[in-house]
Image: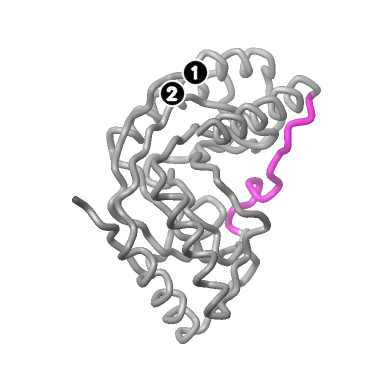
Amino acid sequence: MEKLKQLYTRIAQQGIQAISNHQEQVDPNLQNLKADSRQGLTLLVKLPAHVTRNISFVLNDLKKLEPFQYYYTANTIHITVMDIRRAVPDFHMSKEKLINYRQVIQEKIENVNAINWHLAGLICSPGAILVKGFYSSELQQLRNGLRASLLKNGLLLDERYATFSGHATVARFKKKLIHPQEFLNEINNFHNVELGDFQASEVDLVIHDWYNRQPHLIERFSLKTT
């Protein structure tokens, strides 16, 4: 997990630099969510109630300092296993193509054990607040297997790069920060906060928007459990 720790450190450094220089990345789509028609096909893990509850407690403190940012609700917080088809306006996929994706994913998932997760600490990227997620080797096994299987079966994968992050995005910047330094101090206070452990025995294939507000469940796959 040293590589993962280095990734989170790099993201945090980029976020600190951006915010310190008043260059945080504001998401323009948050100004008019009703007009945002972007959707995509994603494989994700839902978080259990005890974890989202802990995250919500932490976010409540941040809301007091920066109430005008976009904070994910408990039911929308998730961990992305893989963005299969990136979110684009007026996304459409044929029923036949969806069936093909489901079959390939099912064949790969049924041979992978449940994934253990440890969530601890907040960091800022230039445009969002992330919860650091640390995971067992099964996640990378699943990701690598899916990449190979999708390619082998001629199915498009929109990954811009082979991600190995295990974070959950919990807030995005809707406006410029009012108290940037105080905000960074508060994030730093939560740098190592324990947010919970869990085992993911299910993975959801969904069509959803950028913020996972109303995901359309295509299939819920079960990982192997001992």
In the picture of the structure, the residue carrying the numbered disc 2 is: 58
- At x 54% / y 42%, what residue is drawn? 165
- At x 52% / y 40%, what residue is drawn? 169
51 or 134, which lies in front? 134
In the image, taking residue 184 as reference, residue 216 lies left or right, namely: left
| Label 1: few (<14), some (14–19) or many (≥20) C-alpha neighbours in 10 Å | some
Residue 193 coordinates in the image, percent (x, y): 43, 19
Q: Secondary structure at mark 2?
A: helix
- At x 73% / y 32%, what residue is drawn? 24
In the picture of the structure, the residue carrying the numbered disc 1 is: 190
Q: Is residue 108 magenta?
A: no
Residue 44 location, quadrant: bottom left
Residue 174 lies, with reference to residue 14, above or below; the image says below
Q: Amino acid at mark 2?
A: Val
Query: Which residues are the magenta region?
Result: 22-34
In the image, taking residue 10 as reference, residue 96 lies left or right, namely: left
Residue 203 location, quadrant: bottom left
82 or 206, which lies in front? 82
Q: Residue furthest left?
A: 226
Q: Amino acid at mark 1?
A: Phe
Residue 23 coordinates in the image, percent (x, y): 79, 30
